[in-house]
């Protein structure tokens, strides 16, 4: 069974503390995350950001958020993770289980909020570990894959290209990139009723092709760099990006890309 860690234990500053509710409160116990387990009295705090309410597309021209009444959502709510459970009020239930926050938090859509994340890699300098083009996020200061939300009606291939260019200034043909993840992202913004899912691709560039790129931080990124992929850098990444990059590294290794010195081995991991 997949589970989540950040969506159970971390949250943006704007959120109330994640809690099972009641007098004792506290985060959801790890073994009570699956909806299939009993958690009598589970009553997490409800939170929806004002920014989400202000962007209700049924009220605000150009808004990017669903209406607060889930019954008024007209689009199909579908997940890469399979069929979606709903609660007694018709709200979609997080594909990885309880989070300790009800409502949508900072996310605009009920259910999955779909993103696209392109990973570019290059050989490490001086025989060092493989490197990836990473951005530092404005919202939490963490290094991340340079991705972003898929706009309404946008093809995922277009989002991958657009986000790479907006956040890093880099234009690369991603048609031959390899898909390494399509599903849940353990993002600290996730709630019981709204969560991140993403399509992640990887493309490896040789040293000359990478050297020809001029990266500069833009949009939601405050910094950009070629980041060595090591256990330390992966562990410090935003959301479950570290696990997803691990998967990308395994895929590249399977295709004969020299990944890193044996002393810097990256162990395999399964993202949720
Ligand atoms: C992550 O948040 C996704 O994997 C993607 O990288 C990102 C999308 O959110 P914004 O960067 O648009 O806030 O969970």
Image (spheres, rainbow, N blue to C red):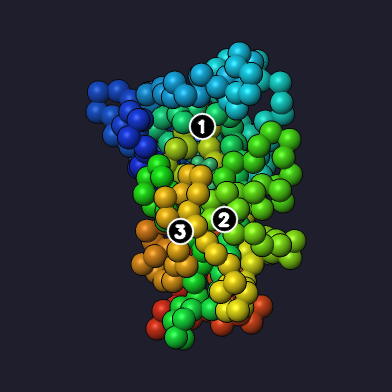
Residues at badges 1 and 2 in contact (C-beta under 8 Å)?
A: no
Vertical side of 94 occupied by 208: above or below? below
Distance CA(mark 1)–CA(mark 2): 26 Å
Which residue is identified by label 2? 169
Q: What residue is at 50 percent from the left and 57 percent from the top? A: 216
Tell me, for residue 145, which label it has, or none: none
Q: Say whether disc 1 or disc 2 marks the residue closer to the N-terminus.
A: 1
Mark 3, secondary structure of its residue: strand
Indicate the secondary structure of the residue bearing disc 2: loop
Q: Are marks 3 and 2 in contact (CB under 8 Å)?
A: yes
Determine whether, in the image, residue 267 is placed left or right of residue 28.
Answer: right
Which residue lies under the disc numbered 1? 107
Left or right of 146 on screen, residue 40: left
Q: Which mark is residue 224?
A: 3
**Residue 19 falls in which quadrant of the image?**
top left
x, y percent for residue 215: 52, 61
């Amino acid at each position: 069974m997949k589970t989540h860690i950040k969506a159970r234990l971390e949250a943006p500053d704007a959120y109330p503390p994640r809690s099972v509710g009641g007098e004792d409160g506290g985060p959801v116990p790890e073994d009570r995350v699956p909806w299939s387990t009993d958690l009598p009295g589970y009553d997490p705090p409800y939170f929806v950001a004002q920014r989400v309410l202000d962007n209700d597309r049924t009220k605000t021209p150009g808004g990017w958020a669903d209406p607060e009444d889930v019954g008024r959502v007209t689009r199909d709510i579908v997940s890469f993770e399979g069929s979606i459970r709903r609660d007694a009020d018709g709200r979609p239930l997080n594909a990885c289980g309880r989070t300790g926050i009800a409502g949508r938090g900072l996310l605009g859509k009920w259910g999955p909020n779909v993103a696209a994340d392109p990973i570019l890699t290059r050989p490490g300098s001086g025989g060092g570990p493989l490197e990836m083009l990473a951005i530092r996020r404005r919202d939490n200061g963490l290094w991340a894959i340079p991705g972003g939300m898929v706009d309404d009606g946008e093809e995922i291939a277009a989002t991958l290209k657009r986000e790479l260019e907006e956040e890093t200034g880099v234009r690369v043909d991603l048609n031959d990139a390899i898909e390494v993840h399509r599903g849940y992202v353990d993002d600290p913004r996730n709630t019981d009723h709204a969560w991140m899912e993403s399509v992640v691709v990887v493309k490896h560039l040789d040293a000359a092709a990478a050297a020809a790129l001029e990266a500069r931080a833009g949009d939601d990124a405050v910094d950009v760099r070629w980041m060595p992929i090591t256990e330390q850098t992966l562990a410090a990444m935003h959301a479950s990006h570290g696990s997803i990059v691990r998967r990308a590294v395994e895929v590249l290794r399977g295709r004969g890309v020299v990944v890193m010195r044996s002393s810097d081995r990256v162990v395999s991991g399964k993202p949720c």
